[in-house]
Image (cartoon, rainbow, N blue to C red):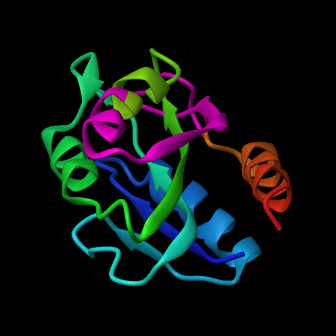
Amino acid sequence: MTYAVRYYTKTGNTKRLAEAIAKELGVEALPISEPVNEAVDYLFLGNSYYAFNIDPEVRAFVSSLDKEKVGKIVNFGSAAMLNSTYKKVKAVADTVGIAMDDKEFHCKGEFKGIHKGRPNENDIKNAIQFAKQYK
């Protein structure tokens, strides 16, 4: 299996998860400003809710993906209030013909004092366990 890990973060929370997942998969976690140039079976995409939606940069990144290079998108992220961004990411992925994996990883993220310290050590361990199922 081949992997890529890309993430978008404003607080650093999703970057921490991306780095743990990438280390487990033996690849580098890169921001979404770095395109996916190589063919991969799984693209792990870290993102979160901002103003009740995925960020326009995430939307643009997913729209730019080449369906010939990306087998499936695996969604992951953290958020203080809302949980899964799966449906929002899938709606964009559907427009470019890239499948979303049914499974995703999500945990709480600290924002303005809410969920202080999250993602924590246990969240990071859970993200690593999540990634292991793809090896």
**Is 114 one of the magenta-colored residues?**
yes
What's the residue at 52%, 36% (across, down)? 78
Q: In the displayed structure, does residue 43 sit left or right of residue 10?
A: right
Residue 46 x %, y %:
46, 50
Residue 68 pos. (x, y %): 38, 68
Residue 38 lies in the magenta stretch: no
Residue 133 lies in what quarter of the image? bottom right
Q: Quadrant of the N terminus?
A: bottom right
Which portion, as a residue range, is magenta? 91-117
Position in image of residue 127 (x %, y %): 73, 50
Q: Is residue 116 above or below residue 131?
A: above
Drawn side of residue 4 relative to residue 104, left or right: left
Q: Where 6 sits versus 61, above or below?
A: below
For the C terminus, the quadrant is bottom right
Question: Quarter of the image holding residue 70?
Answer: bottom left
**On screen, 88 above or below 42?**
above
Name the one closer to the observer, 31 or 67. Answer: 67
Nearest the camera: 38 or 117? 38
Q: Residue at the spot x=29%, y=64% of the render? A: 66
The number of discs equals: 0
Q: Residue at x 67, y 66 (%)?
A: 20
Which residue is more in the foreground, 49 or 13? Answer: 49
For residue 47, side relative to residue 119 (left or right): left
Picture residue at 35% right of the left edge, 25% below the top? 88
